Image (spheres, rainbow, N blue to C red):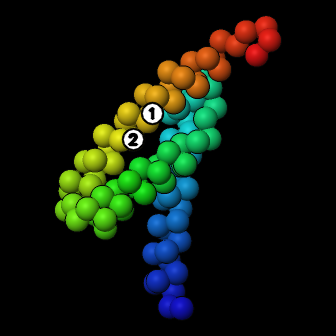
């Protein structure tokens, strides 16, 4: 493999790791609960966009907007039903 290709792939991979780390830190600073499901939520949103483009023939920009809306709704759902209860646990739970 040429050096330039390895360099570009390394930068792309490092950028992905950096963005994942940034997402975990932002979630922790805003909710004070560590949530490692950020990668899973991002991958699920990507899966939604992929299926919108391949199965339904949506253009890229529409699938991208659909994935953003879905990710936002999924984030609100996780925040209200999982992260907020974990922030103030009860004696038994």
Q: Label 2: which residue?
A: 71
Picture quadrant where residue 90 is located? top right
Q: Is residue 1 visible?
A: yes
SS type, badge 1: helix
* Residue found at the far front of this picture: 55
- Measured as percent of width and height from the top left, residue 46 is found at 41, 56
The quadrant of the image that shows the C terminus is top right
Query: Residue 34: horizontal and vertical position, in percent?
Result: 64, 32
Position of residue 15 in the picture relative to residue 88 (left or right): left
Q: Residue at x 38, y 33 (%)?
A: 73
Disc 1: CA contacts within 10 A as few (<14), some (14-19) or many (>=20): some
**Quarter containing the N terminus:** bottom right
**Count of all numbered marks drawn on residues in the image:** 2
Residue 70 vertical placement versus 10 (above, below) = above
* Residue 31 visible in the displayed image: no
Disc assigned to residue 75: 1
């Amino acid at each position: 493999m040429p050096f330039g290709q390895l360099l570009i792939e390394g930068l792309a991979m490092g950028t992905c790791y950096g963005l994942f780390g940034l997402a975990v830190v932002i979630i922790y600073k805003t909710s004070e609960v560590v949530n490692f499901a950020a990668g899973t939520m991002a991958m699920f949103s990507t899966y939604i966009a992929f299926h919108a483009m391949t199965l339904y023939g949506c253009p890229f920009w529409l699938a991208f907007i659909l994935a953003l809306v879905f990710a936002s709704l999924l984030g609100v759902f996780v925040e209200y039903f999982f992260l907020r209860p974990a922030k103030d646990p009860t004696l038994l739970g």
